[in-house]
Amino acid sequence: MRAFLAFQLPDNIREELSQLIDKGKNLVPKGIKWVREENLHITLLFLGDIERSQLKQMDRVFSKIFGGLQPFTINSPIIETIPAREPRIIWVRYRTNVRKIFSLPGSIRNAFPKLGLETKPLKLHVTLGRVRSNAENIPFGKIISLDMPKQNTIIDTVGLFESKLKPDGPVYHLLQQYELKGYKEDDNG
């Protein structure tokens, strides 16, 4: 099964991003495959094809890794097109001051060296849409200038998802959820 790990977004943020997608659909009704609200997330790491028999071991490792992390804040959302020339993806990029988050993919790769996991650096982003065709007719400037809330958002959950590719788009099934509930170093508990 195809699987990935993702930071789960609070419902209010998914709703706001869905409203942003609706505005994008009004600007560009054709040529972009917009992401459905239930599929909005921040990908942590694509795991590729894994066997169901590996899930128990992965669950133990992920519980340890994610259970030791504290919830963290993402902020400063910016709509971007990737790549800048001849865009293929429209996303919202976020920032965080928590540097430890960016070492998570490496920790997971080290725990499962035989899986050959992707080595791309973590970029905190939510994909809004993928360009299908006729990119020269798409008003990217209008899309990236759409108004969006600039609030801070607390991320406190990671999900392990199965991804099934269907003709009308991927369907994600939550296999396991991990709460970020680590303690500060100076906590006594």
Image (cartoon, helix red, strand yellow):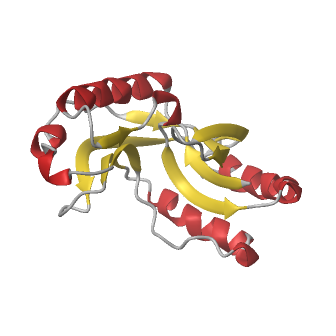
Residues 170 and 104: in front is 170
Task: Give the vertical position of 110 relative to 45 (above or below).
Answer: below
Task: Give the vertical position of 3 relative to 152 (above or below).
Answer: below
Residue at point 32%, 23% (across, down): 19
Residue at point 56%, 37% (across, down): 156
Residue 23 position, x and y percent, is 23, 26
State which quarter of the image contains the C terminus. top right
Residue at point 89%, 57% (across, down): 53
Say whether residue 72 is left or right of residue 93.
right
Choose top left, top right, bottom left or bottom right for residue 44: bottom right
Residues 81 and 102: in front is 81
Residue 6 position, x and y percent, is 57, 47
Residue at point 64%, 42% (across, down): 159
Residue 143 position, x and y percent, is 18, 39
Instruction: Answer yes or no: is residue 182 visible.
Output: no
Residue 61 position, x and y percent, is 77, 58
Residues 112 and 49: in front is 49
